[in-house]
Structure formats: structure tokens, C-alpha cells
Image (spheres, rainbow, N blue to C red):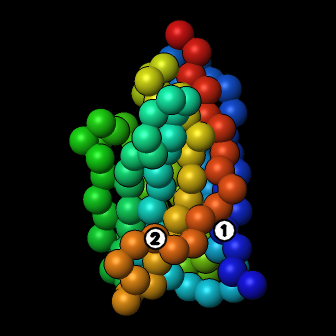
Amino acid sequence: QVQLVESGGGLVQTGGSLRLSCAASGRTFYRMGWFRQAPGKEREFVAAIRWSDRTTNVADSVKGRFTISRDNVKNTVYLQMNSLKPEDTAAYYCAGKGVLDGTYNYWGQGTQVTVSS
């Protein structure tokens, strides 16, 4: 059974930091990503990493503040979030896809990040 389990969310003040973790089990992925969804808004892409060579891409809205990384041994992907802003408040979801998948087919349950002003 394939599972993605996120952790690390919480309440933080503006300017603070959090590190989200997503532990994958049941398979490895070609690419893993982080998405977020704020109340009343559509889900948006945050960052992604290609497992084989660690190539990353990050949304412009978080570039320079968020960093995605992975631990091959733990089969875990991380999202380091620095200089957090109230507009970063959202439920954050981890997702994975295989090399032949056009979209992300595996999703975690989400972890809430709340940034207070």
C-alpha cells in the first residue's frame, strides 16, 4: 500500500520557519512535490524535486524562502519554509508521481500551516 504521510505543520509568527516532512512508503517516485490550498482558493503548486538528480523547481511566490529537498535513505521529502508570511497560511499536501505519470497520482492527507501576523 502506497502512503504519503506529512508532518511538521503548525502555528508560527510572521517571519518564522517551519520544516515539513513527507515520508513515502510502498514505492519510490520519479518526482515528488508540495502543493498548498488556502480556504476558498484553488490548490497551487509550491515546489517539486526529481528524485534521481535532485533537480528542483519552486513557485515564484515562495522562491528564495522555501527549499525542497529529499533523503533517499528515508524516502522522505522536506519543505523548509523560512520568512513565513500570513499569505503562506494553507493546508500543505505532499504528492508523488511516477516517470510515466502525467499528473501526481499519490497524495498525502495534508498538514496545516498557519502564519499569524
Task: Confirm or deny contact between disc 2 and disc 1 (CB under 8 A).
Answer: no
- The N terminus sits in image quarter: bottom right
Instruction: Tell me where residue 115 sits by quadrant.
Output: top right
If you read the primary sequence from the N terminus, does the residue marked by circle 2 or circle 1 appear first? 1
**In the image, is residue 91 above or below residue 105?**
above
Which element type, helix, strand or loop, lies under badge 1? strand
Identified by mark 2, the residue type is Tyr
Q: Position of residue 68 (x, y in %)?
A: 43, 56
The residue positioned 29% from the left and 59% from the top of the image is 57
Instruction: Tell me the CA gap for discs 2 and 1.
Output: 12 Å
Residue 27 is labelled as none
Q: Position of residue 25 (x, y in %)?
A: 69, 79
Identified by mark 1, the residue type is Leu
Give the labeled residue for mark 2: 104
**In the image, is residue 79 above or below residue 96?**
above
Give the labeled residue for mark 1: 4
Q: Is residue 64 visible?
A: no
Query: From this viewpoint, which residue is outermost toward the top?
Result: 117
Q: Position of residue 112 (x, y in %)?
A: 65, 38
Q: Residues within 10 Å of mark 1 (few under 14, many from 20)?
A: many
Along the horizontal axis of the image, is 55 left or right of 97? Answer: left
Q: Position of residue 30 (x, y in %)?
A: 42, 82
Along the horizontal axis of the image, is 67 left or right of 12? Answer: left
Query: From this viewpoint, which residue is outermost toward the right?
Result: 1
The residue positioned 38% from the left and 67% from the top of the image is 49
Towards the viewer: 55 or 90 = 90
Instruction: Tell me where residue 18 sits by quadrant.
Output: top right
Q: Is residue 34 visible?
A: yes
